[in-house]
Each structure stands twice: as C-alpha cells, then as structure tokens.
Image (spheres, rainbow, N blue to C red):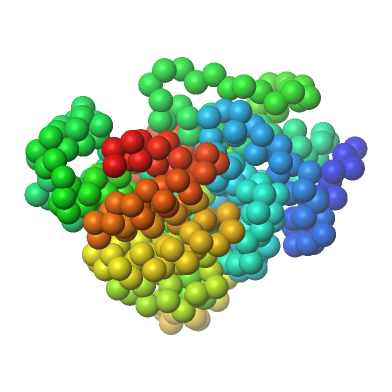
C-alpha cells in the first residue's frame, strides 16, 4: 500500500501527540475504518514509546553502570573488584566452537561435536606442538562483551563495539589504556590471542589470573590456553587447576586437564 | 496503597546510592542461590540480575509505577523468567525450575514479569536495529527519542525547509526502522504484527 505524503505527515503528528480537536477525531475515524493502517500506526507507536524510554536515559544509564557493576560484584559474585566501568560482561564458552582463524582444521570437525573431533585430532597428531595448539583452538571461545549501556562518550563502550566487530587492533589500543580494569584486560588478552600474539596474551591473562579478583578463574582458563598455544603443557596444567568450580570454565578445564 | 519497598523504585529513579546498595544487599545473594540451584554459575547470576535491573529500570522509567507488593517478589519473577528462557534456549528437553522457597505468586506476578521482560527485549532489539539505520535517520530520530525535540526544533536544527518535510522524513526513517525490525531473527518473540505493508 502506498502512503501519500499528507498521510505520512499526519501519522507522524498523531504519534507525536500533535493532533488535536477535529483533526484528531478525523484521524481516529480513519484508523477505525482501516485496521491495516491501525496496525501499522500501533507498530510505530511501540517503536517510539520503547526507544523514547531507552535512548532518553542513556546518560543516566552510563552514570549508574559502574555502581551497579561494583554492587553486583560485591553481593553476587562475592568478591569485590577494584575496577568500575560500564561494560557488562558475559562470558560464553562453547567447546564446539572452532576459531574462525583456523579453516584448515574445520573439515576435521564433524557436527557430532567437539569431543569426537578432539579425539580424532589426538589420534592424528599424537603429541607435540601442533597437538597442544589445536587442543587450545578447540577449547577457545571469545569472551563476549555486551553492554549495560552504549554511549559514545565512554571509550570502553567504543572498545567493546570494536571488539564485537572483530577490529582487534583498534579495540586493543583502547583496552591498553585501562590497565586497572580487569574485564578490559581479559578482553585485551582476547584481542592479542585473536592476533596470535600468544606471549603478550599470556602476560595479560596471567596478571589477572594471579590476583584475587572475581575474574581470576576466567583469566586462569585463558592463561592455560595461551600456555598450550606456546607448547608449555605443564604450566597449562597448573593454571587449569586454578579454574575453580565456581567458574563456568570449570568443566572444560577438568576435561582439558584429563587430555593433557 | 504503595508498598514500603516503593522507596527502592524512587531510589532507582533518583540514583540514590545507599538504597540501591540495599537492593543488591537484600536480593543479590538470593539470585545467586537461585541460579546456582538451577545449573548456573555466579557469573550467570550476575548477568541475569543486571539484566533484570535494566529491565526494571526501563519499566519504571517508561510508566508511572506504584509498587503494591515486595520488590523482591517482582525481581524474582523477572530474573526467574529470564533464566528460564536462557535455559530453554540451550536445552532440548523441558526445563524444570527449582523455585526459591518463600515466594507465593499469582498469575498477575508472572504477567507483570513477562511484560517487563518483553519491554526489555523490545528495547534491546529496537536499539540494535536503530544502530543499523543510515546516519541521517539516526540523527533525525535521535533528536526526537534522545533529546526530546519537537518538530519545529528538528526543522531548525537540521535546516529542513518545512515542518511537513520534517514529518515526512521522520515517517520514512521510522518505516525504515520497522523494516529492519521485522527482519530481525527474534522478531517473533516481540509479539508484534508484521503488518501488510511491505
């Protein structure tokens, strides 16, 4: 259905609450006679109402985010981190996910799952450098960052967007400016890992893993993967043991330990 | 009559730190217990509680809201529903939730939580779709949504020749946004009708 320019203007006025008196009554009568138009206008109103409530409070959200984040660390995680920022982290570990950077091994991974694939790989490459690197690839999944708020004013938010778009170098340069922020440091380590700068990633993760923060177990997991990438199995084992049962990586760490 | 926990709603609206702290102190450990009891980790508990707080904030900012029952109950049904959906998405078999003891609930509680979560989902998806709009449309719609400008102010700010032209542009941008939204993979979860207009 084609909409005339006049009707477009009228719909916009109606949604904005700018119609009154006879104009409003006439327009409401038009809507009553045309359910399809009514449906369309309802959709626009839902968009407007929702985005008004969402976008008009971005500044307030940004101001509140550090407080809510630190309170959640204190009362839910149970271990207060010194950092505070607007990034709301979400870590998703998908053992069956294979790094996009490794197309050469993709064909080896059947849809039946990672466990079977890892077994095949272990049989094909019984020992050595390639084997531990492949194992690490099989277990690696990118730290996923989502935002409690997204504001242009916060450079960590910008870094998160770059990270999400896999622009590792650009994200890295911003994360580098936040050494006190442990979550940013884990994201930084992931950028380095994606760029195959495993020694740098190792140092980044290890600093967090050796601390007492709520992020130590996650960082220990990534530290272990970096050790595997650089063929240091014993050190990897040490860090896998640091992945506590409170961590979502615990099962994967146990499984990986049994394979080393 | 408002429940005494209405003070927490006001605190969230005013960014009153001591009272917001009380919210986390009172109900943070509870969400942790709930998620751990239902196959999650402490990190999941944090995520789900923060998402629930974001949903609650959105709801109370959008609507004038009077709390008539304890806030803990409302929060419980918001995060319970979020966690249930998360588990259900990842599992093939039916999900059985182990409830926290102490909450008596009615179907109204579920409905309220579902409405809040639906609003939150719409907000998240609409915002993601909004970011896919062309810059010129983002600017014009931001003037309305973010800055609360009226048509005449938008006309002056962007040197648009007439008020009618502002209305037409806003309509066209909103329609572009609608088209992006209806293509979103989670569109069916938004409980909106696609409409017959293409």
Residue B198, given in percent of the width and then of the height, sits at 29, 43
Q: Could you tell me which quadrant the N terminus of chain A lies in? A: top left
The quarter holding residue B174 reads bottom left
Residue shown at the point (82%, 34%) measured from the top left: B69
A16 left or right of B135 in image: right
B45 left or right of B140 in image: right
Residue A75, given in percent of the width and then of the height, sits at 70, 49
Count of numbered circles in the view: 0
Residue shown at the point (55%, 76%) measured from the top left: B153
A213 left or right of B161 in image: right
The quarter holding residue B78 reads top right
Q: Could you tell me which quadrant the C terminus of chain A lies in? A: top left
Residue shown at the point (66%, 38%) measured from the top left: B31
Q: Nearer the viewer, residue B66 or A80?
A: A80
Q: Nearer the viewer, residue B138 or A229?
A: A229
- Residue A83, compared with residue A260, is above or below; it is below
Residue A134, given in percent of the width and then of the height, sits at 20, 48
Q: Nearer the viewer, residue A5 or A179?
A: A179
In the rendered image, the residue lying farthest to the front is: A234
- Residue B108, compared with residue A95, is above or below; it is above
Residue shown at the point (78%, 24%) measured from the top left: B102
- Residue B161, compared with residue A40, is above or below; it is below
Q: Is residue B111 visible?
A: no
Q: Is residue B89 visible?
A: yes
Residue B81, given in percent of the width and then of the height, sits at 58, 31
């Amino acid at each position: 259905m084609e909409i005339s320019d006049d009707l477009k203007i009228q719909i916009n006025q109606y949604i904005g609450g700018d119609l009154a008196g006879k104009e409003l009554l006439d327009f409401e009568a038009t809507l009553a006679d045309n359910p399809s138009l009514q449906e369309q206008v309802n959709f626009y109103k839902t968009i407007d109402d929702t985005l008004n409530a969402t976008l008009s409070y971005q500044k307030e959200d940004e101001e509140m985010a550090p407080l809510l984040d630190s309170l959640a660390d204190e009362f839910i995680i149970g271990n207060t981190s010194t950092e505070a920022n607007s990034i709301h982290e979400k870590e998703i570990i998908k053992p069956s996910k294979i790094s996009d950077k490794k197309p050469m091994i993709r064909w080896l991974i059947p849809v039946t799952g990672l466990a079977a694939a890892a077994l095949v790989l272990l049989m094909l490459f019984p020992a050595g450098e390639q084997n531990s690197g492949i194992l690490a690839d099989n277990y690696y999944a990118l730290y996923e960052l989502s935002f409690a708020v997204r504001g242009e004013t916060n450079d960590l938010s910008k870094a998160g967007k770059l990270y999400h778009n896999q622009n590792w170098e650009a994200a890295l340069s911003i994360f580098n400016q936040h050494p006190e922020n442990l979550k940013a440091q884990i994201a930084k380590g992931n950028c380095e890992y994606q760029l195959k700068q495993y020694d740098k990633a190792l140092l980044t993760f290890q600093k967090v893993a050796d601390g007492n923060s709520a992020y130590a177990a996650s960082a220990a997991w990534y530290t272990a993967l970096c050790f595997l990438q650089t063929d240091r199995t014993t050190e990897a084992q040490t860090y896998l043991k640091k992945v506590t049962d409170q961590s979502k990586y615990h099962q994967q760490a146990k499984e990986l330990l049994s394979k080393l | 009559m408002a429940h005494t926990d209405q003070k927490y709603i006001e605190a969230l609206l005013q960014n009153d730190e001591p009272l917001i702290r009380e919210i986390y102190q009172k109900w943070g450990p509870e969400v942790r217990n709930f998620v751990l009891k239902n196959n999650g980790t402490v990190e999941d508990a944090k995520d789900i509680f923060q998402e629930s707080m974001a949903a609650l904030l959105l709801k109370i900012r959008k609507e004038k809201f009077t709390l008539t029952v304890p806030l803990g109950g409302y929060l419980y049904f918001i995060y319970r529903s979020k966690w249930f959906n998360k588990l259900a998405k990842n599992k093939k078999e039916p999900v059985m939730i182990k409830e926290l003891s102490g909450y008596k609930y009615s179907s109204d509680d579920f409905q309220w939580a579902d409405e809040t979560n639906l609003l939150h989902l719409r907000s998240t998806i609409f915002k993601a779709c909004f970011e896919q709009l062309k810059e010129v449309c983002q600017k014009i719609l931001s003037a309305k949504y973010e800055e609360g400008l009226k048509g005449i102010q938008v006309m002056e700010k962007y040197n648009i020749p007439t008020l009618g032209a502002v209305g037409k542009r806003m309509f066209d941008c909103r329609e572009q946004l609608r088209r992006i939204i209806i293509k979103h993979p989670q569109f069916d979860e938004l409980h909106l009708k696609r409409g017959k207009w293409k």
